[in-house]
Each structure stands twice: as C-alpha cells, then as structure tokens.
Image (spheres, rainbow, N blue to C red):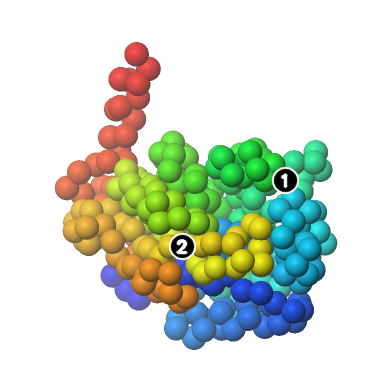
Amino acid sequence: MSRADVVRIAAAQYPVTRFDDWDGWAQWQRDWVSDAAAEGARLLLFPEYCAMELASLFGDEVALDLHGQLDVLQSLLPQYRQQFAALAGEFSVTIQAGTFPVRLDDGRMVNRAMLFRPDGSEDFQDKLIMTRFEREQWGMSGGDGLRVLDSEFGPLGISICYDSEFPAIARRQAELGAVLILVPSCTDTAAGYHRVRIGSQARALENQCYVVQSPLVGDAPWSAAVDVNEGAAGVYTPADSGFPDNGVLAMGEYNRPQWLYADLQLAKVAQVRRDGQVFNFRDSPAQDRFLSR
C-alpha cells in the first residue's frame, strides 16, 4: 500500500481552558492545529463541547449560567467558523472543530459538529440523541437528520458522543459509504467515558471501519457546562485480518492533554469487508428478520 493511501489523523485530548480575550483563544487554536500539521496530520478531530470554554470570555456570571451562555455564544458563531475555516486553509488540513451549540430558526438549540475543508468549504452533523443532562437540564434538542460528509479522504460520518452508543446510527453511516466515523466526546465520569469508548469499539467491529474518539479533558470549576471532563482519545478498528487483534490502533494517556496520532489505511476497510475472517458489515441485515418478529 502506497503512502498516498495513508491518512494521518490527530485526535485531541483537549484541555478545557479559560481565556481573557478572543485573540488568546484564537492563538491557542492555531497552536494546536499547527502542532498537528507539523506532525503530518491531515485530518484533525476536536472534542464535543470544547467550544463552551468561550463562555469564559464573558465573565463568571455568564460562564456559570448554564442556559444563559447558550444564547450569548451565538454572537461568536460566525467568528468561530471563520477561525477554523482559515486554519484549515492555512495548514491544508481538514478539521472537525469542537462542537458548538447552535440556535435554529425554530428556536431549538442543537449540538453541532462542523467540518472545515482546506478548499474553504464546510459541512456539519448535529447530535441526534440527547443525554438526560442535555435534554432535562440544558434544554438541548436532537438534530433533524443523519449525514455522511464528503472529504478528500472519502465519505466520513460523525457520531457525537452519546450517538456512538446506538448501533443503527453508525450502521446507516456505513451503508451510505462511510469508512471512518469521528466521535467527538465530552464525559464527566469514567463510566461515561467508557460507555462512549465501548460504543466506539463496537461500531468499528460491527461496521468493519475506523472509529476515532476525541475527548474533552480537565476541570473547569468556573464553567457550569464543562466543569469536569474525563477520557482518552482512541483509534479503533475491526479485530480482523490486517488490523490489531484487539481492535485498538492507538490509545492516549488518560486525562492527559495531547494529540493522539494514527495512520489510517482507509482502503483496508473495503478489503476487510470483502476478504475478512468474518463479514460483520455484510451480514448485519441478516439480523433484521429476527428483530421484526
């Protein structure tokens, strides 16, 4: 397999951070992207809700207001998009930025993952299924549709945190052509992290594809939204021919801020689906006839 078939991905174990001004935040993002690009990464994945640290720009009263900060952050959404669009172009990388709460025209607030391509185009996937905290305490709503996004590496899916725990979502993404699923996550307990990790590994096994998780890490007592964050980035694969026996290609150090790098050979997904020891992806529809009874 030639080097042209290899895509280096960088998954952030991103530390939630407090900032005094926009320029400080923007420089911090540039530093992270620059570091990953210098290591040869062409696809960068940031965690769920790391954009919530921007509430610190408005002071403690806003940052500690669970609901108020959602509306205040809408004023920064255009700048946020411009920042990552510029970074994608400057460093010739594709970036899935940290998810951002977006107010829709009908008043609903969704959790949106935005993908920025080096050619200046962008796309998004909204989180589909809300956790109890998001729904009951935060008033967040699930998105309207599942998408598979085009990239220079081929079609990819995004399953935001809790979405990765539901097999039908990743299965549909794979059916629509995704050979890589990105999982930005934000979990405040070890149990929450492991739920997303186990879900991500299961989705890689079931669909015989790559699944990459990127968590938010660190404590932010000044924030009502992301005050405690735990996890480790991981790159998961089928447990099959040509892949690691345990289905783990790379794993970060728990709770340590870092980029986790891995070289993905995306053409191997088609190969294992065609010639693997098992055919999880191909055989998946066989179970449907039992479930309908």
Residue 157 or residue 48, whichever sits in front = 48
Residue at coordinates 44% horizontally, 83% vertically from top-left? 39
**Mark 1, residues whose alpha carbon is within 10 Å: few (<14), some, or many (≥20)?**
many
Helix, strand or loop at mark 1:
strand
In percent of width and height, residue 94 lies at: 56, 69
Residue 56 or residue 48, whichever sits in front = 56
Q: Is residue 220 above or below residue 20?
A: above
**Quarter of the rendering occupied by the C terminus:** top left
Type of amino acid at the residue the image marks with label 2: Glu
Q: Is residue 142 visible?
A: no
Residue at coordinates 37% horizontally, 17% vertically from top-left? 292
Residue 130, labelled with which disc? none
The total of numbered circles placed on residues is 2
Q: Is residue 149 above or below residue 50?
A: above
> In whole angstroms, how far apart are the C-alphas of marks 2 and 1?
24 Å
In percent of width and height, residue 200 lies at: 38, 51
Answer with left or right where residue 129 lies relative to residue 3. Answer: right
Residue that carries the numbered disc 1 in the rendered image: 109
Answer with left or right where residue 277 lies relative to residue 136. Answer: left
Instruction: Please tell me whether mark 2 or mark 1 is closer to you in this view.
Output: 2
Q: Is residue 221 above or below residue 74?
A: below
Residue at coordinates 21% horizontally, 49% vertically from top-left? 276
Residue at coordinates 64% horizontally, 52% vertically from top-left? 112
**Quarter of the rendering occupied by the N terminus:** bottom left
In percent of width and height, residue 191 lies at: 40, 51
Mark positioned earlier in the residue sequence (2 or 1): 1
In percent of width and height, residue 186 lies at: 52, 57
In the rendered image, which quarter is residue 181 located in?
bottom left
**Mark 2, residues whose alpha carbon is within 10 Å: few (<14), some, or many (≥20)?**
many
Residue 283 or residue 199, whichever sits in front = 199
Type of amino acid at the residue the image marks with label 1: Met
Residue that carries the numbered disc 2 in the rendered image: 230
